Amino acid sequence: MELSANAKINLTLDILRKREDGYHDLQMVMQSVTLADALTVAPAREAEGQAVSDLHFLPTGGKNLVQIAAAAFRQATGLGGEVDVSIQKHVPVCAGLAGGSADAAAVLTAMNRLAGAGLSPAELAKIGERVGSDVPFCVLGGTALAEGRGEVLTPLSPLPPCHIVVCKPPFSISTPQLFGRVNVRKIVRRPDTAGVIAALDAGDLAGVARRMYNVFEDVLEPRRASEISEIKAALIDCGALGASMSGSGPSVFGLFDDSDSAQAACDRLRETYRDVFLCGPAGAE
Ligand code: C5P
């Protein structure tokens, strides 16, 4: 079975409080994008399922997130056997784009079909909670408000058609470390989440774009922060209606209403960066 696993961007990311369990309560407007990994899922040839990808440093066995998802599915449903998963990675890893979570979500969807389990997307998303905080959103996809750890999802009006330029600078940021740097009482700048939702309802792309913000941008190390700002400035300079960092970074994206401007932004960023992608919004499952 062949599937595509769509990446996500955060139109907004706000941190509301630190919880007793060590996680943080978040409020994020999440958007699936057409940038995607390509997966093949098949019954395992040996006793234990494998995970192979074109990135040699990803784990190949039970530690790969796709095999953790497969095990969570078997445990929750009592259905489905071991599976071999082959992944063609197009979404950069450790990038704030939920590439690993998207692969895990795709495997949950594949196992549901292979085993004929007939679970609803909401039921699959529930299983995904055990695999990672972004997995439930990746199961449902589209445009959604994510709250709690990221697993409490409310579908939103879709992002209007647009061109999305994603640029990942060549460093990675540890998500737990970045959360560790956040002092919730000291957050001064926050995204206008309600304004973004209202702009989505109105089909107002420019209204969405100018209200986007990610509170993690304020806790980056200074040299990382300046690189993120430079990429945002280049996107805006090329005509983006708005630009923001996605998730815990370091990917930065810009929203464009004009394809020539989006292409010009890609060309300009590719002079400096290898991982630059032109994509669009993807709908819900
Ligand atoms: O759930 P996931 O494994 O993706 O989370 C990775 C890490 O990010 C967690 O161990 C936690 O440190 C942090 N996190 C958090 N609050 C969230 C989601 C993740 O503090 N809502």
Image: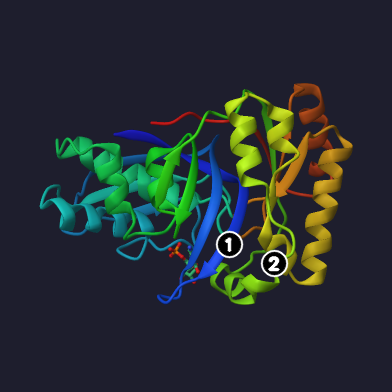
Q: Quadrant of residue 197?
A: top right
The number of callouts visible is: 2
Which image quarter is the N terminus in? top left
Asked if one can make out residue 189 in the rendered structure from this viewpoint, the answer is yes
Judged left or right of residue 64, residue 47 is: left
Amino acid carrying mark 2 in the image:
Ile
Residue at 10% x, 53% y is: 78
Q: Secondary structure at mark 2?
A: loop
Q: Is residue 175 above or below residue 37?
A: below
The answer to whether the residues at label 1 and label 2 have Cβ atoms under 8 Å apart is: yes
**Ligand 1 near label 1 (Cβ, under 8 Å)?**
yes
As displayed, is residue 44 above or below residue 209? below
Q: CA distance from mark 1 to mark 2?
A: 9 Å
* Foreground pick, 57 / 193: 193
Question: Residue sitting at 63 percent across and 66 percent down?
Answer: 173
Does residue 200 sit above or below 230 in this rendering?
Answer: above
Is residue 173 toward the left or the right of residue 140 in the image? right
Q: Position of residue 170 (x, y in %)?
A: 71, 59
- The one of 35 and 153 positioned closer to us in this rendering: 153
Residue toward you, 93 or 245: 245
Residue 135's spot in the image, x, y percent?
Answer: 40, 51
Q: How packed is label 2: few (under 14 Cα within 10 Å), some, or many (20 or more)? A: some
Q: Earlier in the sequence, mark 1 or mark 2?
A: 1
Q: Residue 166, located in which quarter of the rendered image? A: top right
Q: Residue at x 54, y 53 (%)?
A: 27
User: Which residue in the protein does label 1 denote?
Assistant: 15
Tell me the quadrant of the picture where the C terminus can be found: top left
| Disc 2: which residue | 187
Point out the residue furthest to the left here.
Answer: 78
User: x, y (%) of residue 257?
Assistant: 74, 24
**Circle 1 SS class:** strand
